[in-house]
Image: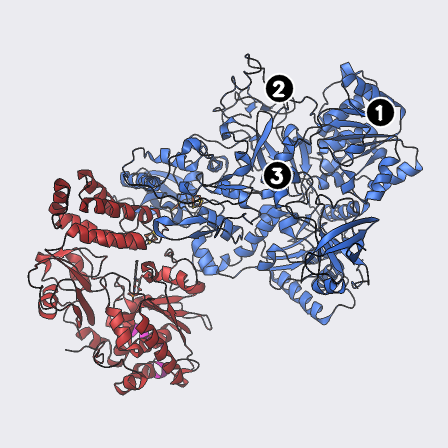
Chain colours: A red, B blue
């Protein structure tokens, strides 16, 4: 089984420096792309490889690149690696950043070349201190080696790369809020259209891609689209870094073919539930995805299959809910996070999320009223996609709406008994 | 045109606009908060949600924000869709979760957009059970009150203050449901446009503090359409009164002039009307001043008006009617403009250009469409504030073309700003000191007045070789001139702005040359003139000699009576010459509403009405004649319009006894007959006998309360309301309830729309002209009528002379204007006297910042603290123009500076 993204990552040794990376074939994709491929060919290849964005939305990466205007000699364009990773339960990008920073840089160079961007940024979560140091160092190494800067490898292509560390707001990971943050403005999102591909950072065409997405690029360039598709037996191409947190025996991250089932992840890789607790449900793709339950254990973790089961692949990192944890408290904790991270721009999210949080807390504390469930349901309905300005609030509603569906009895019990049965 | 379907009904509408404004134009009541007609859409509040269907068959549709959707042909929409309605109601419920519900004690209550929208959506039951969040309010200075708990986070305030008006000290802080709109710390809001927050904010967070000091509900005021009297732009305002006191000024929408906004001088400068410094009754000064009743007044006047030779001195701040009535009284040959010869000459020059019709004098609205702007010798923010705001919009609109290429519509404010970033049109400013607009200009050009003119001449010469070029300009200046010329030439819609502020005719000549050089056969360049006062243009058009000639007349002809109309002559010339003028006569009749240095010398003093108690017509800088109406009939019967007094005097002079004096007839019609240049001013508004369904237009809303009780402490029977014989407006709440003709709109109100947002209902389309056309009439036809040659009086290079400084009059929005300074808030914001010099000059004087230096100027001497202005060219010293204590100077002026009191 191939693990292109993580094959060289070994946390028992220090992360790969430039030499280490080169010795395992690093920067060959840059050489190949910049010296023998036209930008459009790379985009085409990525489209053919059917790489979908690993940041959560799962949009075709190559297609996204193809919206960038290309007949614009000398126009400033930007490429940005989204390394903000603040989705609760998600820590996959951290592994890539800390384990093999040059892989990301290489992916960024190729991606920038494909869209002919000359300036690139790594937008990093502030708390990733180690990653910050490593990325900074790796960028310096890449400059010294001539992979960054002017006329890279004699190709005539120039690329600057900078590291920017955020201030730790979930919103900064939303790509348009990220652009505002990078411009030094408030991290509120922008409307689409216009899409960043046309009017992005500083009003210039911009591509924002997730770290994992970008790390796939060198491998696709090196091995081709068909190879990438063949990595997975299922309907989605490539591998995916899956993760599990919660009361399992071996929480962690694994690079596996797209479409691995929930059960295989849970039982084979995470070693099953801890002694004394049993499985109740799982948020398959991070905090902003709908719960899946027992009956979904054999669902394949790919975009289509998870959607069919009523949830989203999201970041592919799951949070497991066990039977010893109160689902109301669990969801309250999530809504507390989302309410706090709301940027405050649009009414439904700014005012609605704190309301749901307060209701959940009162239910958890035994002061909930039967009509509170209606209010919660009202929020899940009215905070849906399109109703709010960005995807934060709809995301926040996913665990709540599925929670109300699967754990209704628990909610009602809280209200009836005027206390949390788990306490 | 596009066909759209709203709830299955077809409408023909303009494509490209957003759906919200289109629905409002069609008359639908669709709620909104964050969208503002002048500021466009950002999609934040989610209040304007409606359903959009794929096609006729689609029954599911999806919720969209109407303010964020572009109108396209064949759009299927629903406002009434139950889920869209439910969502809109829900948005209000969310907004209300933290709202204090303190309408009863809120200044906005009853004219509040939030109340209106709440009622419109039908939300009425509170389900939120938890404590509300609360904030600390801030002290924001004398103009604006802050009550943050009422905030609904629509972001309009910051979008207006920062994005639209370029303010720096108001922002949004914090995040999630604790966003805070205010300053980093308590303190006076710095923007000259801060008062607009009270109208932009849809709730009671930002409210008018001056109104608060004598608070009245909006519907309890008697209101009338009026014109701002505090600079030459003539912004349209609504003035409101209760209990004989002027209470509030708000913006009156005029699509061609000020649109949705006014400046703080205009909004807060009204308090002179209520001032204790008002002249209360006629005064006859024999040995000691004595109050005079009508009899003794006319006895005195009989002596003066029949036996004496009289001249009349008119005023640039009095209406056409008043000035004309004076002219009729004293006769054309004895009628003088009450301004200095320098000012009169500048105005003559400007009039020649406006009449020649080679260039175009743009309205404020047109100004906003300029793409390259060159300002010569004006600090717009201080001399014509709303023009500064218009230039800001003009400069920012340039990248719109690029936006169109990627299909961003012009109303999509957020996307436009993201795309445009710092990119903007070109702005060049040549002025001796820094100005607020400098931040938008490339490299500011801090030059002496003559050098500004020389640069202007050089620009004009590059544009057209027939325009004379200055000699001896440095290489650097030539390069600059060429650069400006090239930019102007490339422009699609260039705009040149100059004015009278520096009293330098060469600047006006140079600017005129530039505009003429830019004007082609088809398209004329825009040339804006800033003139000194609200009716300077109207007065100049009367074409009378200046004060200098009045003085000559006093010396050479045996004139012994001077009538001064609404004018403090000490603001018009040097103290010594004015003293001379006023002391040479036997009788000095002064008509004005406030006591001042001139009125103090009057032998007969007549109190007159202010703009709020009077009806009149003034001509703005653009040449637009505009009419203002009496707001209220003053309790003090002596507060009569100057024109009414003066016309009585005329009748009296003609032998009619005081008992038989008549109300003046139609003065304006008479004026147009005698002075055809004013053609059109007599038809600016429907005539006094105009009626709709036999009814007059009420100045009081139908909700006006307390009418029968207001004066019950004095007399229990309700007095008969005063009658208005001069206009179609009435001083009552009875009358025609529908929409009045545009020139007669006393207030904006529509069913369900109690706030100023109701203005949407009065427009032909949102942001367009008022129904029936915006009021006001441009008096210059702009048909190329006369030959206009290039001017060629090029001044020589400015060389600082040792020991003598050129003194610059630096205008201040708060302080430099005669009437607005009576408002306590404006007074507080006015600078204290100072003298600005550059560092080198200061060093030569051995003075540092705040040191007192003596300025000797025209036999007067002032001790002024030094303000070092690094950018000021050598040999120039600036003093705040006409602030109290610094009047009585004849401009332009030179002066001598010495350190200390030696
Ligand atoms: C509230 C919010 C937070 C997000 N945070 C992240 C993040 O931390 N990292 C990330 O890659 N994408 C994040 N996204 C998704 C991005 O908006 C964007 O879709 C993604 O960076 C695109 O990259 P991809 O196409 O490679 O997936 C977030 C989205 C939302 C709505
Ligand atoms: S949904 Fe609205 S308030 Fe929430 S984060 Fe997005 S834009 Fe901000
Ligand atoms: S203060 Fe007023 S304008 Fe500003 S966000 Fe709040 S409600 Fe809107
Ligand atoms: S710009 Fe001039 S006319 Fe307009 S409100 Fe201000 S002072 Fe009045
Ligand atoms: S008015 Fe449309 S979202 Fe606020």
Q: Quadrant of residue B617?
A: top right
Q: Are tags 3 and 2 found on a single chain?
A: yes
Q: Are marks 3 and 2 in contact (CB under 8 Å)?
A: no
Q: Quadrant of residue A271?
A: bottom left
Which secondary structure, mark 1?
loop
Number of disc labels: 3
Q: Mark 3 = which residue?
A: B824
Q: Which mark is residue B723?
A: 2
**Which residue is nearer to you in this view: B67 or B263?**
B263
3 or 2: tag closer to the N-terminus: 2
Q: Is the CB–ligand 4 distance for label 2 below 8 Å?
A: no
Instruction: Identify whether B687 is placed above or below B485.
Output: above
Q: Position of residue B415 (x, y in %)?
A: 43, 56
Classify residue A410 as left or right of residue B437. Answer: left
- In the image, the segment drawn in magenta is A34-45
Front of the two marks 2 and 1: 1
Q: Residues within 10 Å of mark 2 (few under 14, many from 20)?
A: few
Quadrant for the C terminus of chain B in the image: bottom right
User: Residue at coordinates 77% horizontally, 46% vertically from top-left?
Assistant: B343
User: How many angstroms separate mark 3 from mark 2 (CA)?
Assistant: 33 Å
Classify residue B196 as left or right of residue B807. Answer: left
Q: Are tags 2 and 1 found on a single chain?
A: yes
Q: Residue furthest front?
A: B901
Q: Chain of mark 3?
A: B
Q: Residues within 10 Å of mark 3 (few under 14, many from 20)?
A: some
Q: Position of residue A33 (x, y in %)?
A: 33, 80
Helix, strand or loop: magenta stretch:
helix
Using the rendered image of the protein, determine whether residue B72 is visible from the camera's viewpoint. no
Q: Position of residue B502 (x, y in %)?
A: 73, 52
Q: Is residue A41 magenta?
A: yes
1 or 3: tag closer to the N-terminus: 1
Q: Mark 1 = which residue?
A: B286
């Amino acid at each position: 089984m191939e693990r292109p993204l993580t094959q060289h990552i070994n946390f028992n040794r220090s992360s790969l420096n430039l030499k280490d990376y080169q010795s395992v074939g690093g920067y060959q994709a840059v050489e190949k792309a910049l010296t023998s491929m036209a930008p459009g060919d790379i985009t085409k290849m990525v489209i053919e490889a059917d790489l979908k964005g690993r940041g959560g939305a799962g949009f075709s990466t190559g297609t996204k690149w193809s919206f960038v205007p290309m007949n614009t000699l000398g126009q400033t364009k930007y490429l940005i690696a989204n390394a903000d990773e603040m989705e609760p339960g998600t820590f996959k990008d951290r592994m890539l950043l800390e384990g093999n920073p040059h892989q990301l840089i290489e992916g960024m160079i190729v991606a920038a070349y494909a869209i002919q961007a000359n300036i690139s940024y790594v937008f990093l979560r502030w708390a990733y201190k180690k990653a910050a140091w490593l990325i900074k160092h790796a960028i310096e190494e890449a400059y010294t080696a001539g992979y960054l800067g002017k006329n890279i490898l004699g190709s005539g292509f120039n690329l600057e790369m900078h590291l920017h560390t955020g201030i730790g707001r979930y919103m900064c990971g939303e790509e348009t809020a990220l652009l505002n943050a990078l411009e030094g403005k408030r991290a509120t999102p922008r409307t689409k259209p216009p899409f960043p591909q046309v009017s992005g950072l500083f009003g210039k065409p911009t591509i924002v891609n997730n770290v994992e997405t970008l790390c796939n690029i060198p491998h696709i360039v090196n091995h081709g689209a068909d190879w990438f598709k063949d990595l997975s037996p299922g309907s989605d191409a490539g591998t995916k870094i899956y993760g599990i947190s919660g009361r399992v025996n071996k929480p962690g991250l694994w690079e596996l073919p797209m479409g691995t089932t929930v059960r295989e992840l849970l039982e084979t890789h995470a070693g099953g539930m801890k002694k004394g607790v049993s499985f109740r449900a799982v948020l398959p793709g991070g905090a902003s995805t709908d719960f899946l339950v027992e009956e979904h254990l054999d669902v394949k973790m790919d975009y289509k299959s998870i959607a069919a089961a009523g949830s989203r692949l999201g970041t592919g990192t799951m949070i497991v809910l066990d039977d010893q944890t109160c689902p109301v408290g669990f969801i309250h904790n999530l809504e507390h996070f989302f309410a706090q991270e709301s940027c405050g721009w649009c009414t439904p999210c700014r005012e609605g999320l704190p309301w749901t949080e307060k209701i959940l807390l009162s239910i958890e504390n035994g002061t909930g009223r039967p009509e509170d469930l209606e209010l919660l349901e009202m929020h899940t309905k009215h905070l849906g996609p399109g109703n709010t300005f960005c995807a934060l609030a709809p995301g926040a509603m996913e665990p709540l709406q599925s929670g109300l569906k699967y754990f209704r009895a628990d909610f009602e019990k809280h209200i009836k008994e005027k206390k949390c049965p788990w306490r | 045109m596009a066909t759209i379907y709203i709830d299955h009904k077809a409408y023909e509408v303009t494509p490209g606009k957003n759906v919200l404004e289109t629905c409002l134009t069609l008359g639908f009541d669709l709620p909104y908060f964050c969208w503002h007609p002048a500021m466009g859409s950002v999609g934040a509040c989610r209040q304007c949600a409606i359903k959009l269907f794929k096609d006729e068959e689609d029954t599911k549709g999806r919720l969209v924000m109407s303010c964020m959707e572009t109108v396209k042909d064949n759009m299927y929409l629903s406002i009434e869709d139950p889920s869209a309605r439910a969502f809109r109601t829900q948005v209000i419920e969310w907004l209300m979760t933290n709202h204090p519900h303190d309408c009863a004690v809120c200044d906005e209550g009853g004219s509040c957009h939030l109340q209106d929208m709440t009622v419109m959506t039908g939300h009425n039951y509170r389900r939120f059970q938890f404590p509300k969040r609360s904030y600390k309010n801030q002290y924001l200075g004398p103009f604006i009150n802050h009550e943050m708990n009422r905030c609904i986070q629509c972001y309009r305030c910051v979008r207006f203050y920062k994005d639209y008006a370029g303010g720096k000290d108001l922002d949004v802080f914090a995040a999630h449901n604790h966003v805070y709109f205010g300053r980093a710390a308590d303190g006076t809001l710095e923007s000259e446009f801060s008062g607009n927050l009270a109208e932009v904010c849809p709730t009671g967070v930002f409210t008018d503090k001056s109104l608060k000091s004598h608070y009245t509900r909006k519907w309890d005021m008697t209101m009338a359409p009026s014109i701002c009297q505090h600079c030459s732009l003539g912004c349209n305002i609504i003035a409101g009164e209760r209990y004989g006191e002027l209470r509030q000024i708000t913006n009156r929408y005029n699509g061609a002039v000020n649109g949705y906004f006014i400046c703080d001088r205009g909004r807060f400068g009204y308090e002179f009307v209520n001032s204790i410094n008002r002249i209360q009754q006629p005064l006859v000064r024999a040995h000691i001043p004595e109050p005079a009743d009508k009899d003794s007044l006319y006895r005195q006047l009989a002596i003066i008006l029949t036996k004496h030779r009289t001249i009349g001195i008119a005023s640039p701040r009095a209406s056409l009617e008043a000035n004309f009535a004076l002219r009729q009284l004293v006769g054309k040959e004895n009628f003088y403009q009450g301004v200095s010869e320098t000012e009169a000459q500048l105005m003559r020059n400007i009039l020649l250009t406006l009449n020649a019709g080679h260039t175009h004098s743009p309205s404020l609205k047109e100004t906003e469409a300029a793409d390259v702007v060159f300002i010569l010798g004006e600090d717009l923010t201080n001399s014509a504030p709303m023009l500064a705001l218009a230039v800001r919009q003009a400069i920012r609109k340039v990248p719109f073309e690029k936006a169109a290429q990627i299909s961003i519509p012009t109303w999509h404010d957020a996307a436009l700003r993201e795309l445009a970033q710092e990119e903007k049109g070109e702005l060049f400013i040549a002025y001796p000191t820094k100005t607020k607009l400098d931040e938008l200009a490339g490299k500011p050009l801090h030059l002496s007045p003559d050098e500004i003119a020389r640069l202007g001449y050089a620009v004009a010469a590059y544009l057209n070789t027939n325009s004379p070029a200055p000699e001896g300009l440095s290489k650097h200046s030539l390069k600059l001139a060429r650069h400006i010329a090239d930019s102007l030439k490339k422009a699609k819609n260039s705009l040149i702005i100059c004015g009278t502020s520096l009293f330098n005719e060469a600047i006006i000549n140079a600017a005129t040359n530039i505009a003429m050089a830019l004007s082609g056969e088809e398209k004329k360049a825009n040339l804006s003139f800033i003139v000194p006062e609200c009716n300077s243009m109207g007065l100049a058009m009367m074409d009378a000699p200046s004060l200098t000639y009045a003085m000559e007349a006093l010396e050479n002809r045996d004139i012994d009576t001077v009538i001064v109309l609404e004018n403090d002559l000490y603001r018009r010339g040097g103290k010594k010459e004015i003293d001379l003028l006023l002391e040479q006569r036997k009788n000095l009749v002064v008509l004005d509403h406030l006591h001042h240095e001139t009125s103090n010398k009057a032998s007969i003093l007549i109190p007159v009405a202010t703009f709020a108690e009077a009806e009149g017509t003034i001509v703005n800088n653009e040449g637009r004649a505009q009419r203002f109406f009496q707001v209220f009939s003053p309790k003090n019967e002596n507060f009569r319009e100057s024109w009414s007094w003066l016309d009585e005097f005329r009748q009296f002079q003609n032998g009619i006894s005081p008992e038989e004096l008549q109300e003046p007839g139609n003065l304006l019609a008479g004026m147009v007959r005698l002075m055809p240049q004013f053609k059109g001013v007599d038809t600016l508004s429907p005539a006094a006998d105009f009626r709709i369904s036999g009814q007059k237009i009420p100045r009081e809303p139908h909700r006006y309360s307390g009418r029968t009780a207001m004066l019950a402490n004095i007399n229990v029977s309700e007095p008969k309301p005063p009658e208005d014989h001069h206009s179609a407006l009435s001083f009552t709440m009875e009358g025609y309830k529908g929409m009045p003709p545009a020139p007669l709109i006393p207030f904006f109100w529509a069913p369900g729309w109690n706030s100023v947002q109701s203005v949407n209902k009065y427009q032909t389309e949102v942001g367009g002209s008022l129904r029936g056309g915006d009021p006001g009439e441009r008096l210059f036809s702009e048909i190329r009528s006369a030959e206009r040659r290039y001017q060629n009086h090029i001044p020589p290079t400015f060389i600082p002379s040792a020991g003598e400084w050129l003194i610059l009059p630096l205008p201040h929005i708060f302080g430099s204007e005669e009437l607005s300074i009576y408002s306590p808030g404006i007074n507080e914001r006015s600078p204290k006297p100072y003298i600005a010099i550059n560092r080198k000059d200061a060093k030569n004087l051995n003075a540092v910042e705040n040191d007192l230096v003596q300025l000797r100027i025209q036999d007067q001497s002032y001790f002024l603290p030094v303000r070092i202005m690094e950018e000021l060219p050598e040999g120039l010293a600036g003093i705040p123009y006409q602030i109290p204590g610094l009047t009585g100077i004849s401009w332009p002026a030179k002066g001598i500076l010495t350190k200390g009191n030696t």
